[in-house]
Image (cartoon, rainbow, N blue to C red):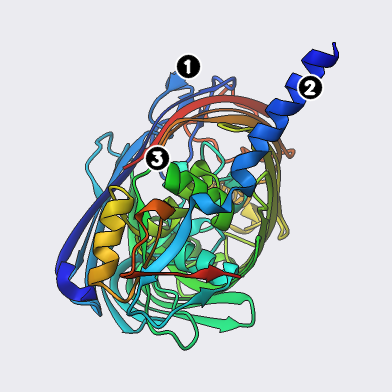
Amino acid sequence: MADDSLPSLTLNGFGTLGVVHSDVSDADFVSDPLASSGAGYSGDWSAEVDSRLGLQATLAATSAFSATVQVVSEKRFDGSYSPAIEWAYLQYDATPNLSLRVGRMVQGNFLNSEYRKVSFATPWVRPPAEIYRVVPVANFDGVDLRYRYYIGELINDLRLSYGGGSVEYETGDIESSDSWGVSQQTRWGNTTLFASYGEVNVSAQELTQFFDIYRLFGPPGEALADRYEVDGKPLRFLSVGVNYDPGQWFVEGEWTRLSSSTLLGSSESTHMTAGYRLGKWTPYAALGRARVTSDTFEPGLNPAFYPSPFAEGAVLLNSTLNTLLSSGLQQDSRTVGLRWDFRPGVALTAQYDHIDFRSGSPGGLINQQPSFQPGGTMNLFSLALDFVF
Amino acid sequence: MAKRLSRFYCCVLLSLLPCTGFADLVVVVSADAALSRIQRQELKDLYLESRTPLPGQGRITPLDQSERSRERSEFYQRYIEKTPAQLRTHWARLIFTGRGQPPQALANSQAVVERLIRDPNALGYIDPQFLDERLKVVTVE
C-alpha cells in the first residue's frame, strides 16, 4: 500500500534576494571567502554577497533507493552565476534508521552546516562568519553513513563521512582529500546537542609553489616550508553546538576549534544567538568571537645570509608569509536583526552587524586597497528576502 | 465599567474555548489498524521526524491536511506545539539536507477518511463529524 506512490519525483527550491552595505569603502565584505567582489569597495550596496537560488530534485525509486540532486546558483569568483552542484547522491536505506549515500555531499562540521545556504532555515541573513568560515572546503565527493538510534526520549543521529573535493577561486583552486568526519546530534524535547570532529587534508597549487620557492633558500628555507606547508598535513576541526527552542523563544550556541601545524594555524571561535517569536516577527541578537591561537608573526629567513637578489627575495617571501599568517579571522561581532515571516514560505530579514577586528586582522575582507588599515571596525546593514518552495 | 469588564472576560473566556474544546478534532486510523493509543511524544516524532517508527507498531504513514485548513492549525497547535513558521523552518532543514519530506497533505477531512479506509498503516486527524464505523479514534496520551 505504502508503495503505490513509487517511483516518485519531488521538486523543492530555496533562494535569497539580499543586499548588504558595508561602511568600509576600501575593501570588500564577502560571505564566501573565495568570492572575487563584495560590498564596500566594489559597490556601496551589493546584491552579490547573499543572493542565490537553489533547486533540488529527489527521485525515490523504491522504498530503499533514492537519488537527490541539488544545484545552487550564486555569484561565482568568475563573475558568473553558473550553477554548482551542492548535493548529488544515491541513497540506500538499509533499514528505516540506517542509510548509506554515495556522491557529492556537504560536510557536517557545524550545527547548521548542511543547510547553511538555505537562509530561510536559519535565523540570520548569513551564517556567522566566526564559525562557518573556518572550513575551506565544505563539499566532498565520497560516501557517508547515517544511523539513527533511540535511547529513551533521546533521538540520536550519527553521521560518518569520507571523501575529497575541490573549490575554485580566481587564481587557482583548493583541493581536499582523505577528509573524514563524524558528527552526532541528539535531540531531547526542545534541546538539540551537536558535536563533530573531522580531519581535512587540503592543498592549493599557489601555496605549494610559494613553499617551493622557500625551499630554494637552503636548510633555513626548507625548515620554514616544512613548518608552514599545508599540503600533506591534516586540518583538525572540533566543534560543539547547542540549541534550545521551546517555541516562544530560542537560543543557540556554537564553539569550534581548528588545529593545524600549517600556515592556516589554529583558531577558536564561539557564537551565540537568541531570538524571541512574536507571531510573525522574530527579533534576534547574536554575539560572535574568533581568535587565532597560533603565532601570527614569523621572523622568517634572515636576508643578511643571502646575496642580492636573494636577500630581496627573502624579504618579499617573509612579507607574504606574514600577510598570510595574519589573515586569519580575529574579531568580535555583535548582531541584531528582525525576521518577518509575512507569507507562508517567505521571510524578510533585516540585520545589522558591528564587527570589531582585532589589531592586525583584515577580518576576511578582500580587494583591500592601499588605504585599507587592518584592525578597524565595520558596520554592515543587510536586507534579505528568503523563500522556500 | 463593570459591563465593559464583563465583556472583556467574556472575550477572554471565548478565546480560551478552542484550547479546551477537544471534541473539535480527533486522531484516527482505519478500524482495521492495530494502533489504538499513541503517546504525545510519539505523535510529535511521527509528524516531525519522518520515518520514525513507533516501537512494536511497524511503519506508520502520517497524513496532513491542507495548510489553510482549520484542522491542521488546530492539530499542530494542540498536539505538536509548533507554529507554522517553526514548521516551515524545520522542514526546510530536513528537505534540503535529504533527511525527509513533510507528511502528505490531503485536501480536507473527507480526503483523509478516504485514504485511511484504504490504508491501515496511515494515521490522520479529522473533524469528528466525519467519523464513521470504518474508522477508529486513537487516544493521545
Q: Position of residue A82 (x, y in %)?
A: 22, 42
* Label 3 element class: loop
Residue sitting at the far front:
B133
Figure quadrant of residue B102: bottom left
Q: Is residue B10 above or below residue A214?
A: above
Task: Kindly report the distance in space between the C-alpha atoms of the residues bearing marks 3 and 2.
Answer: 64 Å
- Pointer 2 residue: B6
Type of amino acid at the residue the image marks with label 2? Ser
* Label 2 element class: helix
Q: Is residue A218 visible?
A: no
What is the chain letter for disc 2? B
Q: Are marks 1 and 3 on the same chain?
A: yes
**Count of all numbered marks drawn on residues in the image:** 3
| Eye-nearest disc, 1 or 2 | 2
Type of amino acid at the residue the image marks with label 3? Ala
Q: Is residue B29 above or below residue A82?
A: below
Residue drawn 67% across the image and 39% down it: B16
Figure quadrant of residue A37: top left
Quadrant placement of the C terminus of chain B: bottom right
Query: Crowdedness of circle 3 by 10 Å Cα count: few (<14), some, many (20+)?
Result: many
- Pointer 3 residue: A35
* A5 or B39, nearer to the observer: B39
Query: Which mark is drawn over residue A44?
Result: 1
What is the chain letter for disc 3? A
Q: Position of residue A183 (x, y in %)?
A: 54, 73
* Label 1 element class: loop
Type of amino acid at the residue the image marks with label 1? Asp
What is the chain letter for disc 1? A
Query: Crowdedness of circle 2 by 10 Å Cα count: few (<14), some, many (20+)?
Result: few
